[in-house]
Image (cartoon, helix red, strand yellow):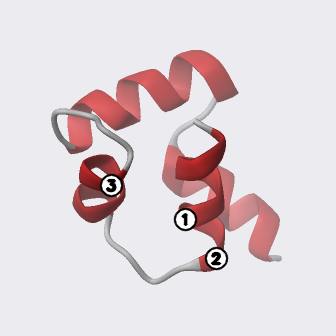
Amino acid sequence: MERARDLRLNSDKTLVEIAKACGFSGQSHLTRAFGQIVGTSPGLWRRARRT
């Protein structure tokens, strides 16, 4: 999940590309796992850190 967070924050890759790079079966799998571990969606998490 740390790699997914890093890619989400520091790259222009799509969630599909990040999911594939991190071994998830797809975007929805990454989004579910991200929400369970981090406590929010990948999009909300990134927007909160880019402001």
Res. 39 in view: no
Rendered-image quadrant of the N terminus: top right
Q: Are marks 1 and 3 in contact (CB under 8 Å)?
A: yes
Q: Front-most of 48 and 16?
A: 16
| Label ID, residue 10 | 2
- Residue kind at label 3, given as amino acid type: Ala
Left or right, 33 with reference to 44: left
Left or right, 51 with reference to 10: right
Q: Which residue is mark 3?
A: 21
- The residues bearing labels 3 and 2 have C-alpha atoms spaced at a distance of 14 Å
Left or right, 22 with reference to 49: left
Q: Earlier in the sequence, mark 3 or mark 2?
A: 2
Q: Which residue is mark 1?
A: 7
User: Image point 80% across, 64% down: which residue?
Assistant: 49
User: Image point 61% across, 33% down: which residue?
Assistant: 40
Label 2 crowding class (10 Å Cα cut-off): few <14, some 14-19, many 20+? few
* Most distant residue in the top direction: 36
Question: Element type at marker 2?
Answer: helix
Rendered-image quadrant of the C terminus: bottom right
